Image (cartoon, helix red, strand yellow):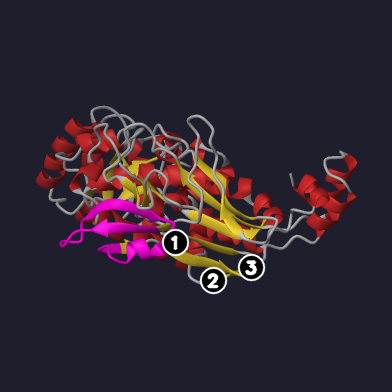
Amino acid sequence: MIQAALKAGTHRRRCVFETFTRRLPAGRRYGVLAGTGRFLEQLAGFRFDDGQLAFLEEQRVVDGPTLEFLADFRFTGTIHGYAEGEAFFPHSPVLQVEGTFAEACVLETLILSILNHDSAVASAASRMTGVAEGRPCLEMGARRTHERSAVAAARAAVVAGFAGTSNLEAGRRYGLHTIGTSAHAFTMLHDTEEQAFRAQVDSLGTGTTLLVDTYDVEAAVRRAVEIAGPRLGAVRLDSGDLAGQAGWVRELLDALGNRDTQITVTSDLDEYAIAGLQAAPVDSYGVGTRLVTGSGAPTTSMVYKLVARENSDGVLEPVAKRSLGKGSVGGYKHAARRLDAAGRAGAELLALDPGLLEGESARRLSVPLVADGEILPGATGAEGVEAAAARHRASVAELPVAARRLSEGEPVIPTEHLDH
């Protein structure tokens, strides 16, 4: 497309692209935007190096003028979008890229690959932290996804309320709280379970978490208390009837004088399993496979569409698709969330004319992210994750209570186009 636009002389036309999803995954009440900070970090160094350019030339992917354009590529446009961590709904313009056609076109796959993946994980994570009702959820999914997406998934999970991650690279890169646990292999390495527990406590202290279901749970709990005493940090259950086991393990710990020893559970948890454990005396949840794969919705199906472009007279005008089932609404959208007197969200408002939002009791949703090619501070690195997690908490708190329901249903608030 860029090569053809270069030849036609239209590559410098000013354009606006919007990223949005036409619909939420089946049954979901809201989505959570994640990955904005990662995209901006990638954008800061987004260049075509000599090896990449040589490949494009050798394979005759593009011609000489296009190679020259790519060799000098720098994004010089402007980007607005929802703050990372914000809830979103069908047609929410979560990222708006304004620049020349050629510059904006180059970024499409980068934007969609990051936002679709990270938002899917964050949306699943938000459902899990919602039903956990304040009990910590811990991300443990690195072994169930690609090694690079594991870092991104850990970050997205923390954006949506997870308390920590087992992924040390994510912790290093984004300042996340890191956690860990011993595996069954460590217990089976030793001649006896007692030797394994003593080795772990001697090295890590009594505040460690001991895995108690390798052999016999009751015997292991008694052995753990005997070795670590009343300051034993936690025991972990990883199999069987977690709710039933947690109940009698809690009673046993209390009877042995370990009222402060916590119980953490793992074993293929998802939001439904966590909801099923609400009445059990569980203190924290370790979640892996279902979290990093979006818990049944591995993508948010976001798209990147041209909504306005400069015409031959130099005037920016709306454009829209008319495709059956995939039509779009042209024009740069201004977005806000209607709130009632109690601060509860009632609708997602979109308007081409920002004046239509002036009379509404609504919170504006779009924030500046890039100005004339310069990435604005606050959205990247550890600082960006902290800000996104705070935005997520505030955003979800203003949604109707029905947003937390796991039963299938429509988006918890409607999207209203005020110009139509």
Q: Give me the residue at 67% from left, 66% from top.
A: 76
Coordinates of residue 368 in the picture (x, y in percent): 49, 67
Residue of label 1: 385
Is 68 above or below relative to 137? below
Residue 287, label in figure: none
| Extreme-top residue of the structure | 240
Label 1 Cα crowd, 10 Å radius (few <14 / some 14-19 / many 20+)? many
In front of the other: label 3 or label 2? 3
Q: Is residue 45 visible?
A: yes
Mark 3: amino acid: Gly
Residue of label 3: 373
Is 14 above or below relative to 1? below
* Residue 353 belongs to magenta span: yes
Q: Is residue 198 visible?
A: no
Q: Give me the residue at 51% from left, 48% from top.
A: 330
Residue 376, label in figure: 2
Relative side of 38 to 133, left or right: right
Distance from the alpha carbon under mark 1 to that under mark 2: 15 Å
Label 3 Cα crowd, 10 Å radius (few <14 / some 14-19 / many 20+)? some
